[in-house]
Image (tube, rainbow, N blue to C red):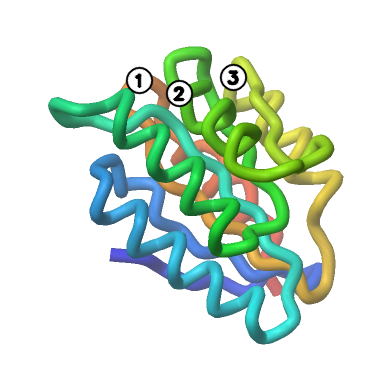
Amino acid sequence: MMDVVALADGTILLDAHDATDFDAVKHAQRALAEYRINGFDTVHVAGLLGGENVADDLDALGRVNVRLNIHHLVVVGEKAHGMHRAAEHEGSWDGESIPVSDVARAYDEITSLRGPRVAILVTGGVDTSLGEIVERLKGDRP
């Protein structure tokens, strides 16, 4: 399930921080891509997935981010960096994929990307909950 929340600065938050499996994250990425089609800048914040084929799933989702032309990917936690590497390999991005070590650094990156006509998707991490990012963002509502 994904909640959509409008923030005070015009940012749209797509909260799917409980999504930690391949299919749920891929579905959420497609929802974010709809915002891009409608003229929004797009940001996907992602953590480590669960499941049996984690490395393959991270690789595939990193590539999907590029194929959907999502503008920024913030990957949280070293174990999830396979998604970042796949995004870099899929396209000639120049800093659009940003690996960070923890939630605090992820929030700092997101803060610099926020604004009107920006949609931010947060999908979950099995080793680090990204719910803290969502709660901090939701604290800034109209």
Residue 115, by quadrant, is bottom right
Q: CA distance from mark 1 to mark 2?
A: 9 Å
Q: Looking at this view, is 134 or 60 the one in front?
A: 60
* Quadrant into which the N terminus falls: bottom left
- Return the x and y of residue 82 as percentages of the image width and height: 47, 24
- What residue is disc 2 on? 80
Q: Secondary structure at mark 2?
A: helix
Q: For this view, does 88 lie left or right of residue 117?
A: left
Mark earlier in primary sequence (1, 2): 2
Task: Look at discs 1 and 2 and give the one toward the viewer.
Answer: 2
Indicate the amino acid at tag 3: Asp
- Residue farthest bottom in this picture: 38
Q: CA distance from mark 1 to mark 3?
A: 11 Å
Circles 1 and 2, Cβ within 8 Å, touching? The answer is yes
- What residue is disc 3 on? 102
Q: Secondary structure at mark 1?
A: loop
Q: Is residue 71 above or below residue 111?
A: below
Mark earlier in primary sequence (2, 3): 2
Residue 28, by quadrant, is bottom left
Indicate the amino acid at tag 2: Ala
Indicate the amino acid at tag 1: Asp
Q: CA distance from mark 2 to mark 3?
A: 11 Å
Disc 3 crowd rating (10 Å Cα; few below 14, some 14-19, many 20+) is some
Disc 1 crowd rating (10 Å Cα; few below 14, some 14-19, many 20+) is some
Circles 1 and 3, Cβ within 8 Å, touching? The answer is no
What residue is shown at x 52% (from left), y 33% (from top)? 86
- Return the x and y of residue 57 as percentages of the image width and height: 31, 36
Circles 2 and 3, Cβ within 8 Å, touching? The answer is no
- What residue is disc 1 on? 127
Q: Is residue 12 above or below residue 38?
A: above
Mark earlier in primary sequence (1, 3): 3
